[in-house]
Image (cartoon, rainbow, N blue to C red):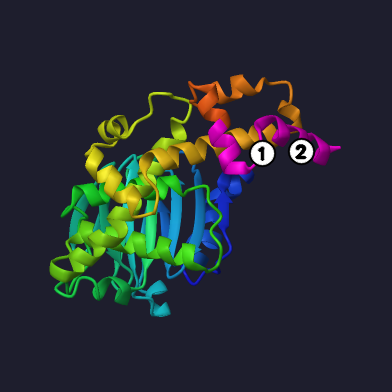
Amino acid sequence: MDDVTTARITFNTDTLPERDRFAAYCEHMMRRIARLDIMRRDASPFAAAVDIQQAGSVGICHIATSTSDYVRTPVLMRDGDDSLCIVLCRSGGAYQTQRDNDQGLAPGEAIVCDSGRLGSIHVTANSRFWCIKVPRPRIATMLPRHERFAGIKLDRDPVARRLLFAYLAGTLNLDLPADGQAVALYDHHILDLLALSIGAEGEARRMAEEGGVRAVRRAAILREIDNRLHDPALSAAGTAIRLGITPRYIHVLLEESGHSFSEHVLERRLAKIAEVLRDPRQRRRRIGDVALAHGFSDLSHFNRAFRRRYGATPSQMRRQGAAKAE
């Protein structure tokens, strides 16, 4: 990715006639934006789809591609870009060539490519990748002992690498704004996870762990809560088992946000129910059924909690929603 704007950029060869797909992708996406050349590996039909966003200083790209070779050539290197591009393989397979060294890239693995050096990624099967483009100083300051980045595998902290994959997947469909505190945090969390995966040590590692890993694990807990709001048995213990962490760690992470596990669950259930009650299209659903469908097994407790939260009964909120619709 070159100096793209903060606007989201998408490209899909399926929208083009087959005869034009490879040429358009090569010229408009790879050479102009990614600053890479691309060569086909065989005569099979070519297909690719790209989704690019900028999040602060970090560029995020999701790419699905047929077999092909992506090359950083001497001509394209004249742009002076020496940023680092981290390639994470979601499916398929590839190998990287940089510094006269070939390294395989299998699903779940990630490797660093140095835009300041000649190199290539050879995609050997229909594949999907994340690509994270980071200005070199942002990584270099966190990893001062690393003089060479090209070809480094993200294998020093497998948990951090898995969290990085999950974090990117969880934000794939977000339209990130140009700036703001949320984007700054997103930027920092990605960099923290990258630093841990590559091998941050000492103070740099401590700071990264306190930032990115905790934030991403907290996000995973909240996502698990949202996915299981319908389950009356939703608990910190069960959530801990599914996420592979301890219940104590869940309580510590959520208490840092100012709310306990049960408070988060109650707040999200009430918010979802309020959303249904305000929707005139769902006015025929019985309020008790809505509450049961969102994990409440005690309707008296639901009514008390709802009135305490919204200052109105569920029936009153439904009538207010109907009046606004009219």
The amino acid marked with disc number 1 is Ala
| Residue lying farthest to the right in this orientation | 326
Element class at badge 2: helix
Viewer-nearest residue: 189 or 252? 252
- When the figure is inspected, residue 306 is found, relative to residue 195, above or below; the finding is above
Q: Are marks 1 and 2 in contact (CB under 8 Å)?
A: yes
Image point (58%, 29%), residue name: 303
* Apparent side of residue 173 relative to residue 60 in the rendered image (left or right): right
- Our reading of the magenta stretch's main secondary structure is helix
- When the figure is inspected, residue 186 is found, relative to residue 300, above or below; the finding is below
Q: Nearer the viewer, mark 1 or mark 2?
A: 1
Residue 216 visible? The answer is yes
Residue 53, percent from left and from top: 50, 59
Residue 243, percent from left and from top: 28, 37
Question: Image quadrant of residue 58?
Answer: bottom left
User: What is the magenta range?
Assistant: 304-326
Q: Is residue 318 magenta?
A: yes
Viewer-nearest residue: 10 or 264? 264
The amino acid marked with disc number 2 is Gln
Q: Which residue is mark 2?
A: 320
Viewer-nearest residue: 200 or 325? 325
* Apparent side of residue 188 relative to residue 210 in the rendered image (left or right): right
* Apparent side of residue 87 relative to residue 209 in the rendered image (left or right): right
Q: Which residue is mark 1?
A: 312
Binning the other alpha carbons within 10 Å of mark 2 as few (below 14), some (14 to 19) or many (20 upward) gives some
